[in-house]
Amino acid sequence: MKTEPISERPKISFDILDSIRGIAALYVAVAHCRGTLWIGGNEFLKLFPRNTWNVWDYLMFGSSMLTRLAVEFVIVFFVLSGFSIAYSLSANKSPLQFYKRRFIRIYPSYVVALIWAGLVFLITYYWYPQWYNGTFNQGAFIRTAEMKDYFRLDVILKNLFYMPGHGFITPFWSLTYEVIFYLLAPFLMRRVKLYTIVSIVLFLINFISPSRVQSWSLPVYIYEFLFLYNIYFVAGVLLFYYYKTIENWFKNISKRVILAAIGGAVILMYAFNISLRSETVYSFLVAAVLSVLLILYFLTYQVRIKWLMGIGKFSYTLYITHFASVYLYLGFYWAIAKPAAPYILNYFVWMPAVLFCLLIAYLQYTLVEKRTKKVLSSLRKKPVPAPIISG
């Protein structure tokens, strides 16, 4: 695969891609607010059999199904990462410089998010010890039980080194694979063709015979990165290196057809997820296609949706803080409503939690992530020293 020379790399308005990050992060936050705060489908069916439903019950249950693609929208982040990192390394292939930029960009916010999760744990444990002592063992309280060992030294060290557990940092699982990709990217980008071929082969081996691959008993992070998730980073990398060719082809397709394809991809994702009752490789692959279509559409037609771009600017902080924020919101709800049952039947209770999570995320973004971005901007403006030539 012949990659484009640096001088020919496409000019890309990365602020536009913030809209797509905004879509993905907002969807995940909405999905977790609904999934954590509302009673949920299975429990609802136990309390209210379908033969007792009225029109509102059908509308409520049906609309809740629209929030079930949280993992699929994480795949969107993987494709965006592949695209963005390939662009970044096309300008400066120095691993040390790349690692320095990535560390400044993601780690301070990550550590603050870990602290935030611990703080929410301490607050809610003080308020409601019954959340943590085994009194409740369903719905949202599955995650509270997982927080008991959060301040154990080995757990703290694992979290700091991107080997997160569950509880209030459950969404952090995807960051492990992002970091693995970052660590390997400076070397993978030197042999994009080989990287692509090997990645496709590994993906297909697992797709065809997953039981055989699992019998090799590889460490979970190595197995899941190589055989499950790496292929989506590859999709983003390939989109960057073939961007000019694909964009020229894309421009020949009418907007209506493109929008129909985007809508069709969303419908197909839901079809796979609902029919198979969970996220699977099939819905992931469609999510990757959707990601490519969105990137091409937004960049080709310079689509700027200001409010989504605004959310996209702090999408990383939103992603890593929102789940703990949901539990703090639940604590406030308990203080006000004093519920008699552990589950929440009122469908509207979870909706204000989205705004609450956005507010908390924006405050943390202002305090941490925004500052790290300024540091990175200053580093990029520094002139590169001229090489010393011995005479």
Image (tube, helix red, strand yellow):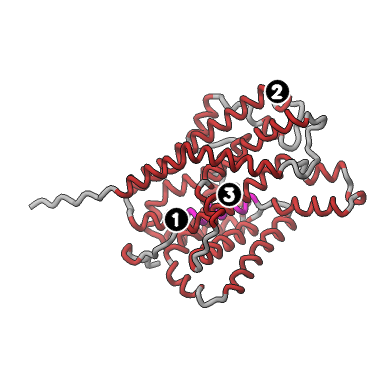
Q: Is residue 2 left or right of residue 239?
A: left
Which is more N-terminal, label 2 or label 1? 1
Front in this rendered view, residue 253 or 373: 373
The extreme right residue here reads: 52
Residue behind mark 3: 25
Badge 3 element: helix
Residue under the point 52% across and 24% down: 153
Marks 1 and 2: CB-CB under 8 Å?
A: no
Count of number-bearing discs: 3
Tell me the mark number nearer the camera, choosing from 1 and 3: 3
Give the residue type that dot 2 points to: Pro
Which is more N-terminal, label 3 or label 1? 3
Which is more N-terminal, label 2 or label 3? 3
Residue behind mark 1: 84
In reply to whether residue 355 is colored magenta, the answer given is no
Quadrant in which the N terminus is drawn: bottom left
Disc 3 residue crowd, few under 14, some 14–19, many 20+, Cα 10 Å = many
Span colored in magenta = 70-81
- The image shows residue 50 at horizontal and vertical percentages of 88, 50
Q: CA distance from mark 1 to mark 2?
A: 44 Å
Badge 1 element: helix
Q: Is residue 283 left or right of residue 239?
A: right
Residue behind mark 2: 129
Front in this rendered view, residue 111 or 177: 111
- The image shows residue 335 at horizontal and vertical percentages of 73, 28
Front in this rendered view, residue 165 or 132: 132
